[in-house]
Amino acid sequence: MPGVLASRNRRRRADGAASRAPRGRTVLHGLGLLAILASLGWVGFQLDAWAASSPRLALRTVKVQGLHRSTEHELLRLAGVAPGMNLWSLDPGAVAQAMAAHPWVRSVEVTRELPDTLQLKVEERTPVALAALGELYVVDADGAPFKRVSAAEALDLPLLTGLTRESAEGDPSGTAARLREALAVADAYQRAFDGPRLSEVQLGEAGFELITTDGVRVVLGRDDVDGQLRRLRRVRDELQKRGLLASAIHLENRVRPGWVAVQVQPGAPAPRH
């Protein structure tokens, strides 16, 4: 019996030693991996510190695409970027965000081209109209009045009127929606007619008043603008046949949508478009 017990104890000790051996190897393996990772982290830290101070990574060249109204100097000044700065330390996202504060800039894509070049791909806003909101503002296709008009800017664009600065400041999204309505009407007119061009689009509660470059007022309702413009073409053709020139054409009759009221300039010759 004592021999049997001794044999069992020897087997337990052998099994315990066998089970501890893989665990020991696992612990050693894990410690080895940690040591490698720590070494890699230290090397990465040293490389980052070297790159952040290396004169080899100083900014020397800026390549810019898409500039028409903004300038490279203005964008770099907004972002606080100057030649000689360490390119590795520049944050492309922060640079792009700072440059997007320029009123003409819709978005900027910033790319670092190591060792010394910064690439800027700029998308500028496209001006489509001017809006009278206390002062004159440039409006883009989204209906956003994005900047005041400066005296140095020559912008031959239709003028949008009928809104106030108070409405624009109190309800920017509503103002943009109304301006988009006016832009849609102006676009429909320009698609339908080669001339005369639009000078002004006045927004009213019930519709729109278009003023052409020859001084004729065209009053439209808000519904079925394309249908009203087709009637306008027929009216113009008829006036031209009769040798008459209108000073105002009303197409906004809600009760009788097909009716048109024309105010004719007495004694004026008909235009030849």
Image (cartoon, helix red, strand yellow):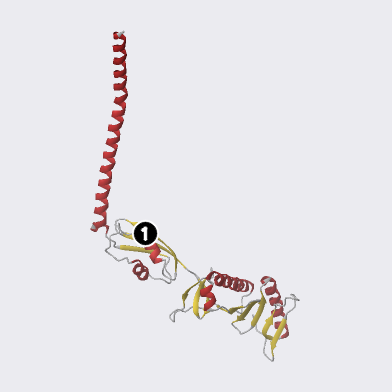
Where is residue 272, by image quadrant?
bottom right
For the point 30% across and 35% down, the residue is 30
The quarter in which the C terminus is drawn is bottom right
Which of the pair 41/192 is nearer the observer? 41
For the point 34% across and 63% down, the residue is 62
The quarter in which the N terminus is drawn is top left
Q: Position of residue 157 (x, y in %)?
A: 53, 77
For the point 27% across and 36% down, the residue is 31
Left or right of residue 192, residue 106 in this image: left
Which of the pair 227/238 is nearer the observer? 227
Where is residue 91, by image quadrant?
bottom left
Left or right of residue 127, residue 210 in this image: right
In the rendered view, tell whether residue 41 sits above or below residue 87: above
Secondary structure under badge 1? helix
- Residue type, mark 1 in image: Pro
Q: Which residue is mark 1?
A: 92
Q: Position of residue 245 (x, y in %)?
A: 68, 86
